[in-house]
Image: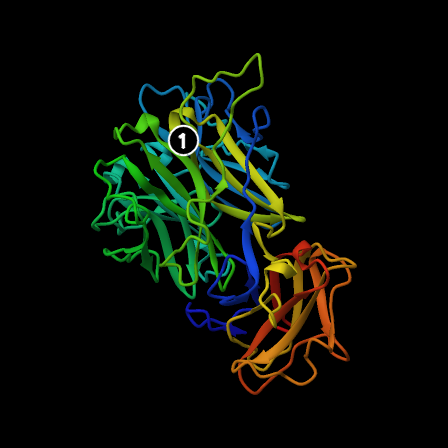
Amino acid sequence: MYIHNGGPRQRLEEIVLFPFDDHSLPLQCGVELRLEGHMTPCGRTRIAVDLGEEGAPDSERVVYYGTVHRVGDELWMWYLGQGRDAAWFERVCFATSTDGYNWHKPNLGLVEYNGSRDNNLVDLNQGSHHVQSCVVYHDPDDPDPDRKFKMLFQSRKYDSSFAAAFSADGLSWQESSNNPVGSWLEMAGGTRHNGCYYICGQGGTHAGGVRQLVTHISYDFENWSQASCMGMRRSNVSPRSPVTGSSAGEQIHLGASLWNRGNVIVGFYGMWNGHPSNDRRLVTMDLGLAVSNDALHYREPIPDYPIVSAAEDGWQELPHGNTLVNYPALIQGQGFEQVGDETLFWYAPWPEQSSDGVRVASWPRDRLGYLQPFPAGRMRPGQAPHIVSAPIDLDGKPAQLALNIDGLGDYSDVTAEIITEQLEPVPGYSAADCIPPSASGLSQPVAWRGRDTVQYENGPIRLRLNFSGIRPEDIQLFAAYMNTVGG
């Protein structure tokens, strides 16, 4: 399948229509977007990767300028650890998990630290240089077995210009002979999209300050663009004045961590809110939501909405709690994963001095936000709440439709229609033919009389979803999925 939503033309086995992606769901009538933010109240911060034992390379700080990937049946995490070194000196550590909440630090035996190799350090230059950030890419289909794992990292070795490394197992790394492969960049997220590698962070050479979301690209992971795309900034949004100090005002910290869903890339970015005094100690920083369809240009569905709130993070309940702490601030690493019926995301406190462990945020699968229909009283005469997708080319193959939806019942209904790109009905796929889901769920199939798949070969189609009933406002549409049948 292909979707014409402004992104690159690429064949997809699944198209995900999120309510906050208004390029894939551009036509809307009588619906309102609501996001589902994550917040950890006082005393309920869940630390997934804790500080190491005394003498370990992560005994002082666990910093999530790293990555999580699913590898086989496990989740693998690369993160930065700080031990009892005399200076700021972080090394790349490794942990594994099966559920995303409970992590094991294996004894890798690769790098000597404090006179012992009994630790979880990966071999990146034998831990001889401070690493400030790293993003790992997993390419299991790379024909070169020694490049199945790829890393971009920022290190003192190259004066914080970003460098590349490769690995067969994700544990023992060999640097690129071309290092450094890029310029100064503080990075948080990366992805491969339509055959191109993207690295997202803060840096580049652009007007308006350093903390903006920028992206560099490469097609072979070693030759990276010197120029970057400034994909989003916050300081030029009216009525805000331009940033006057390097740390003042509304900025974007480290770009965004990226979740590539094919037709849309979901990003969680550092929502830097600097104090007018330009004092970094007074910065607050939630994590915001941004989306892209081309991996270069990003937009906020709801500006300044905290998809992961820093409020009360790490604050303990009385008598242990202390209100005299840093202003609430978080950092994002690279890593979203679906585990069972949940969507998980990992993050940590900022600044690094405050990072006592990697946290995990969770949502029911894909339920980051929803469209809610207006009640009947808000609609104009002759109108009904509905949405229409961007054109979808089925590429001559049947597809199945499923909805991630809540609130269906005796007084609230949804029906699906398939129409042409020109908005004409497709016979057999009308609302009257639709057999809608009978109950709410994370992936509820939709069919039509005599048809459980969508088939049309006379050009692109669009999906139209209609919301009706006495109380259509009870419905919450979190996502619609189109999946190719038969590969």
Q: Nearer the viewer, residue 145 or 155?
A: 155
Q: Position of residue 418 (x, y in %)?
A: 62, 77
The residue closer to the viewer here, 14 or 156, is 14
Residue 403 quadrant: bottom right
Residue 28 against residue 476 in the figure, above or below: below
- The image position of residue 196, as x and y in percent, is 38, 62
Residue at 46% x, 44% y is: 305
Q: Position of residue 240 (x, y in %)?
A: 29, 44
Left or right placement of residue 449 versus residue 211 in this view: right
Q: Quadrant of the N terminus?
A: bottom right
Q: Quadrant of the C terminus?
A: bottom right
Q: Position of residue 161 (x, y in %)?
A: 26, 44
Q: Give the secondary structure at mark 1.
A: loop
| Image position of 138 with respect to 219: above or below | above
Give the residue pinned by disc 1: 350
- Judging depth in this view, the residue of 261 and 190 nearest the camera is 261
Q: Check disc 1 and give the amino acid type.
A: Trp
Residue at image point 40% right, 35% down: 285
What residue sits 47% from the left and 45% below the top?
170
Q: To which quarter of the image does residue 372 belong?
A: bottom right
By what rule are the colours in the image chosen? rainbow
Determine crowd level at label 1: few under 14, some 14-19, many 20+ residues with C-alpha closer than 10 A: many
Question: Measured along the vertical axis of the image, is residue 274 above or below residue 7?
Answer: above
Residue 215 located left or right of residue 10: left
Judge left or right: residue 248 versus residue 433.
left
